[in-house]
Image (cartoon, grey):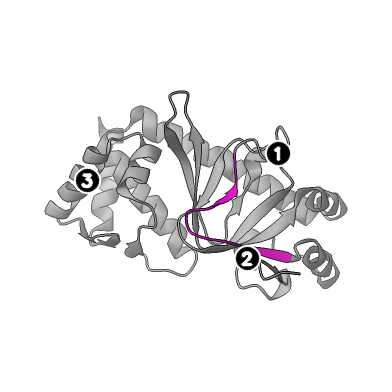
Amino acid sequence: MDAQTIKVACSNCNLRELCLPMGLNAEEMSKLDNVISTRRKVKRGTALFSTGERFTSLFAVRSGFFKTCVTTADGRDQVTGFQMTGEIIGLDGIVSDHHSCDAIALEDAVVCVMPFDQVEELSREFTTLQHHVHKIMSREIVRDHSVMLLLGSMRADERLAAFLLNLVQRLHARGFSQSELILRMTREEIGSYLGMKLETVSRTFSKFVEDGIIDVKQRYVHIKNTEGLKQIVNSQNCR
Protein backbone atom coordinates (compact mmCIF):
# COMPACT_ATOMS: atom_id res chain seq x y z
CA MET A 1 0.00 0.00 0.00
CA ASP A 2 1.63 3.25 -1.15
CA ALA A 3 1.41 6.75 0.35
CA GLN A 4 -1.58 7.55 -1.87
CA THR A 5 -3.61 4.65 -0.49
CA ILE A 6 -4.31 4.75 3.23
CA LYS A 7 -6.44 2.42 5.32
CA VAL A 8 -9.62 4.11 6.56
CA ALA A 9 -12.45 2.96 8.82
CA CYS A 10 -15.96 4.32 8.19
CA SER A 11 -17.05 3.38 11.70
CA ASN A 12 -14.59 5.90 13.19
CA CYS A 13 -15.10 8.67 10.60
CA ASN A 14 -16.69 11.90 11.85
CA LEU A 15 -18.29 12.39 8.41
CA ARG A 16 -20.15 9.10 8.57
CA GLU A 17 -23.52 10.76 9.21
CA LEU A 18 -23.15 12.90 6.09
CA CYS A 19 -22.15 10.35 3.47
CA LEU A 20 -23.26 7.02 4.96
CA PRO A 21 -26.59 5.79 6.35
CA MET A 22 -27.51 5.82 10.01
CA GLY A 23 -28.83 2.67 11.67
CA LEU A 24 -26.25 0.12 10.53
CA ASN A 25 -25.44 -2.44 13.21
CA ALA A 26 -21.86 -3.38 14.18
CA GLU A 27 -21.70 -6.34 11.77
CA GLU A 28 -23.00 -4.29 8.84
CA MET A 29 -20.61 -1.44 9.65
CA SER A 30 -17.71 -3.88 9.73
CA LYS A 31 -18.63 -5.19 6.26
CA LEU A 32 -18.83 -1.63 4.94
CA ASP A 33 -15.43 -0.85 6.47
CA ASN A 34 -13.97 -3.73 4.47
CA VAL A 35 -15.45 -2.38 1.22
CA ILE A 36 -14.50 1.28 1.71
CA SER A 37 -10.94 0.42 2.67
CA THR A 38 -8.81 3.05 0.96
CA ARG A 39 -8.40 6.78 0.63
CA ARG A 40 -6.93 8.65 -2.31
CA LYS A 41 -5.18 12.01 -2.20
CA VAL A 42 -5.95 14.42 -5.05
CA LYS A 43 -3.75 17.47 -5.55
CA ARG A 44 -5.29 20.84 -6.35
CA GLY A 45 -5.92 21.22 -10.08
CA THR A 46 -5.73 17.50 -10.86
CA ALA A 47 -8.54 15.15 -11.90
CA LEU A 48 -10.09 12.52 -9.67
CA PHE A 49 -11.58 11.07 -12.87
CA SER A 50 -12.05 12.29 -16.44
CA THR A 51 -14.70 12.11 -19.16
CA GLY A 52 -14.68 8.70 -20.87
CA GLU A 53 -12.80 7.01 -18.05
CA ARG A 54 -14.19 3.62 -17.02
CA PHE A 55 -16.48 3.83 -14.01
CA THR A 56 -15.51 1.54 -11.14
CA SER A 57 -16.08 3.49 -7.92
CA LEU A 58 -18.00 6.20 -6.15
CA PHE A 59 -15.98 8.64 -4.07
CA ALA A 60 -16.90 10.20 -0.73
CA VAL A 61 -15.14 13.54 -0.23
CA ARG A 62 -13.32 13.31 3.09
CA SER A 63 -11.65 16.72 2.82
CA GLY A 64 -11.34 19.36 0.14
CA PHE A 65 -13.54 20.73 -2.63
CA PHE A 66 -14.21 19.62 -6.22
CA LYS A 67 -15.86 20.89 -9.36
CA THR A 68 -17.40 18.72 -12.05
CA CYS A 69 -17.35 19.98 -15.61
CA VAL A 70 -17.96 18.92 -19.20
CA THR A 71 -16.46 20.19 -22.45
CA THR A 72 -18.99 21.79 -24.78
CA ALA A 73 -19.06 21.29 -28.56
CA ASP A 74 -17.14 24.53 -29.08
CA GLY A 75 -14.39 23.48 -26.65
CA ARG A 76 -15.44 25.47 -23.57
CA ASP A 77 -15.44 23.99 -20.08
CA GLN A 78 -18.93 24.09 -18.53
CA VAL A 79 -19.04 23.69 -14.75
CA THR A 80 -21.90 21.38 -13.76
CA GLY A 81 -21.48 21.29 -9.98
CA PHE A 82 -19.37 21.83 -6.88
CA GLN A 83 -18.86 19.04 -4.34
CA MET A 84 -17.60 19.39 -0.78
CA THR A 85 -16.71 17.33 2.28
CA GLY A 86 -19.24 14.58 3.00
CA GLU A 87 -20.69 14.47 -0.51
CA ILE A 88 -20.48 11.66 -3.07
CA ILE A 89 -18.87 12.06 -6.51
CA GLY A 90 -19.03 9.68 -9.46
CA LEU A 91 -22.73 8.92 -9.85
CA ASP A 92 -22.51 10.12 -13.48
CA GLY A 93 -20.69 6.90 -14.38
CA ILE A 94 -23.43 4.49 -13.36
CA VAL A 95 -25.60 4.84 -16.46
CA SER A 96 -22.97 3.87 -19.08
CA ASP A 97 -20.10 2.44 -17.00
CA HIS A 98 -18.01 5.43 -18.10
CA HIS A 99 -17.71 8.87 -16.57
CA SER A 100 -19.49 11.67 -18.45
CA CYS A 101 -17.65 14.57 -16.79
CA ASP A 102 -14.32 15.59 -15.25
CA ALA A 103 -13.98 15.93 -11.47
CA ILE A 104 -11.23 18.43 -10.63
CA ALA A 105 -9.92 19.22 -7.15
CA LEU A 106 -10.20 22.95 -6.33
CA GLU A 107 -7.85 22.42 -3.38
CA ASP A 108 -5.79 19.52 -2.04
CA ALA A 109 -8.35 16.83 -1.23
CA VAL A 110 -8.79 13.33 0.14
CA VAL A 111 -11.54 10.94 -0.99
CA CYS A 112 -12.70 7.56 0.27
CA VAL A 113 -12.91 5.03 -2.57
CA MET A 114 -16.18 3.08 -2.72
CA PRO A 115 -15.95 0.22 -5.32
CA PHE A 116 -19.42 0.31 -6.85
CA ASP A 117 -19.83 -3.42 -7.53
CA GLN A 118 -19.13 -4.15 -3.86
CA VAL A 119 -21.40 -1.33 -2.68
CA GLU A 120 -24.17 -2.74 -4.91
CA GLU A 121 -23.65 -6.21 -3.49
CA LEU A 122 -23.80 -4.94 0.08
CA SER A 123 -26.86 -2.79 -0.63
CA ARG A 124 -28.75 -5.92 -1.68
CA GLU A 125 -27.73 -7.53 1.61
CA PHE A 126 -28.97 -4.75 3.88
CA THR A 127 -31.74 -2.44 2.80
CA THR A 128 -30.57 0.54 4.89
CA LEU A 129 -27.59 0.99 2.57
CA GLN A 130 -29.71 0.44 -0.55
CA HIS A 131 -32.17 3.10 0.59
CA HIS A 132 -29.30 5.50 1.25
CA VAL A 133 -27.81 4.98 -2.24
CA HIS A 134 -31.25 5.72 -3.70
CA LYS A 135 -31.48 8.89 -1.59
CA ILE A 136 -28.09 10.06 -2.88
CA MET A 137 -29.22 9.53 -6.49
CA SER A 138 -32.49 11.33 -5.82
CA ARG A 139 -30.64 14.26 -4.27
CA GLU A 140 -28.56 14.61 -7.44
CA ILE A 141 -31.71 14.65 -9.57
CA VAL A 142 -33.25 17.35 -7.35
CA ARG A 143 -30.02 19.37 -7.54
CA ASP A 144 -30.04 19.13 -11.34
CA HIS A 145 -33.63 20.40 -11.39
CA SER A 146 -32.65 23.30 -9.13
CA VAL A 147 -29.86 24.27 -11.51
CA MET A 148 -32.30 24.16 -14.43
CA LEU A 149 -34.56 26.53 -12.49
CA LEU A 150 -31.60 28.83 -11.81
CA LEU A 151 -30.61 28.99 -15.46
CA GLY A 152 -34.10 29.09 -16.90
CA SER A 153 -36.08 31.55 -14.85
CA MET A 154 -33.88 33.67 -12.58
CA ARG A 155 -32.17 37.02 -13.08
CA ALA A 156 -28.43 37.33 -12.42
CA ASP A 157 -28.87 38.64 -8.86
CA GLU A 158 -31.33 35.84 -8.04
CA ARG A 159 -28.92 33.22 -9.36
CA LEU A 160 -25.98 34.46 -7.31
CA ALA A 161 -28.09 34.91 -4.16
CA ALA A 162 -29.46 31.35 -4.48
CA PHE A 163 -25.95 30.02 -5.06
CA LEU A 164 -24.56 31.71 -1.92
CA LEU A 165 -27.49 30.57 0.21
CA ASN A 166 -27.15 26.98 -0.99
CA LEU A 167 -23.38 26.98 -0.42
CA VAL A 168 -23.53 28.35 3.12
CA GLN A 169 -26.40 25.96 3.99
CA ARG A 170 -24.36 22.94 2.87
CA LEU A 171 -21.29 24.18 4.75
CA HIS A 172 -23.34 24.80 7.89
CA ALA A 173 -24.52 21.17 7.80
CA ARG A 174 -20.83 20.28 8.13
CA GLY A 175 -20.31 22.44 11.21
CA PHE A 176 -19.17 25.65 9.54
CA SER A 177 -20.49 29.17 10.04
CA GLN A 178 -23.94 30.18 8.82
CA SER A 179 -22.67 33.57 7.70
CA GLU A 180 -19.01 33.23 6.64
CA LEU A 181 -17.39 31.19 3.91
CA ILE A 182 -14.30 30.93 1.75
CA LEU A 183 -15.09 30.51 -1.93
CA ARG A 184 -12.95 27.63 -3.24
CA MET A 185 -13.99 28.37 -6.79
CA THR A 186 -13.11 31.40 -8.96
CA ARG A 187 -15.61 34.03 -10.11
CA GLU A 188 -15.22 32.59 -13.61
CA GLU A 189 -16.16 29.09 -12.38
CA ILE A 190 -19.19 30.51 -10.56
CA GLY A 191 -20.21 32.24 -13.78
CA SER A 192 -19.82 29.04 -15.78
CA TYR A 193 -22.02 27.17 -13.31
CA LEU A 194 -24.69 29.90 -13.15
CA GLY A 195 -24.70 30.73 -16.85
CA MET A 196 -23.33 34.24 -16.26
CA LYS A 197 -20.42 36.18 -17.73
CA LEU A 198 -17.49 36.93 -15.44
CA GLU A 199 -18.26 40.65 -15.59
CA THR A 200 -21.85 40.00 -14.51
CA VAL A 201 -20.71 37.88 -11.56
CA SER A 202 -18.29 40.59 -10.40
CA ARG A 203 -20.87 43.34 -10.88
CA THR A 204 -23.50 41.39 -8.92
CA PHE A 205 -21.08 40.74 -6.05
CA SER A 206 -20.33 44.48 -5.98
CA LYS A 207 -24.06 45.31 -5.91
CA PHE A 208 -24.60 42.99 -2.93
CA VAL A 209 -21.73 44.74 -1.12
CA GLU A 210 -23.13 48.20 -1.92
CA ASP A 211 -26.56 47.11 -0.63
CA GLY A 212 -25.00 45.96 2.66
CA ILE A 213 -26.00 42.33 2.12
CA ILE A 214 -22.48 40.87 2.07
CA ASP A 215 -18.84 41.81 2.63
CA VAL A 216 -16.24 40.42 0.24
CA LYS A 217 -12.45 40.30 0.61
CA GLN A 218 -11.00 38.31 -2.27
CA ARG A 219 -12.49 34.82 -1.69
CA TYR A 220 -13.78 35.49 1.82
CA VAL A 221 -17.51 36.24 1.97
CA HIS A 222 -19.38 37.45 5.05
CA ILE A 223 -23.16 37.29 4.70
CA LYS A 224 -24.42 40.26 6.72
CA ASN A 225 -28.07 39.99 5.74
CA THR A 226 -29.29 36.45 5.07
CA GLU A 227 -32.89 37.62 4.84
CA GLY A 228 -31.83 40.11 2.18
CA LEU A 229 -30.45 37.27 0.04
CA LYS A 230 -33.64 35.24 0.58
CA GLN A 231 -35.80 38.19 -0.46
CA ILE A 232 -33.80 38.51 -3.70
CA VAL A 233 -34.40 34.83 -4.50
CA ASN A 234 -38.07 34.93 -3.51
CA SER A 235 -38.72 38.12 -5.46
CA GLN A 236 -39.46 36.05 -8.57
CA ASN A 237 -42.52 34.64 -6.79
CA CYS A 238 -43.91 38.18 -6.50
CA ARG A 239 -43.67 39.01 -10.20
Residue at 69%, 76% in the rendered image: 12
Quadrant assignment, res 239: top left
- CB-based contact (under 8 Å), mark 1 and mark 2: no
Q: Earlier in the sequence, mark 1 or mark 2?
A: 2
Which kind of residue does numbered mark 1 sit on? Ile
Q: Which residue is mark 1?
A: 94
The residue indicated by pointer 3 is 202
Q: Single out the residue that lies furthest toward the front.
A: 2
Name the quadrant of the N terminus.
Answer: bottom right
Q: Are marks 3 and 1 in contact (CB under 8 Å)?
A: no
The x and y percentages for residue 149 are 41, 32
At 72% from the left edge and 56% from the top edge, which residue is drawn? Answer: 114
In the shown orientation, is residue 30 left or right of residue 223?
A: right
User: Is residue 235 visible in the rendered structure shown here?
Assistant: no
Question: Is 95 situated left or right of 229 in this image?
Answer: right
N-terminal of the two: label 3 or label 1? 1
Residue beneath disc 2: 17
The x, y position of residue 90, in whole percent, is 63, 46
Residue nearest the observer in this picture, 144 or 45: 45
Mark toward the start of the polypeptide (2 vs 3): 2
Residue span colored magenta: 38-50
> Between marks 1 and 2, how big is the CA–CA gap?
23 Å
Q: Which labelled disc corresponds to residue 237?
A: none
Residue found at the far bottom of this picture? 12
**Which amino acid, by three-letter code, is at mark 2?**
Glu
Q: Secondary structure at mark 2?
A: helix
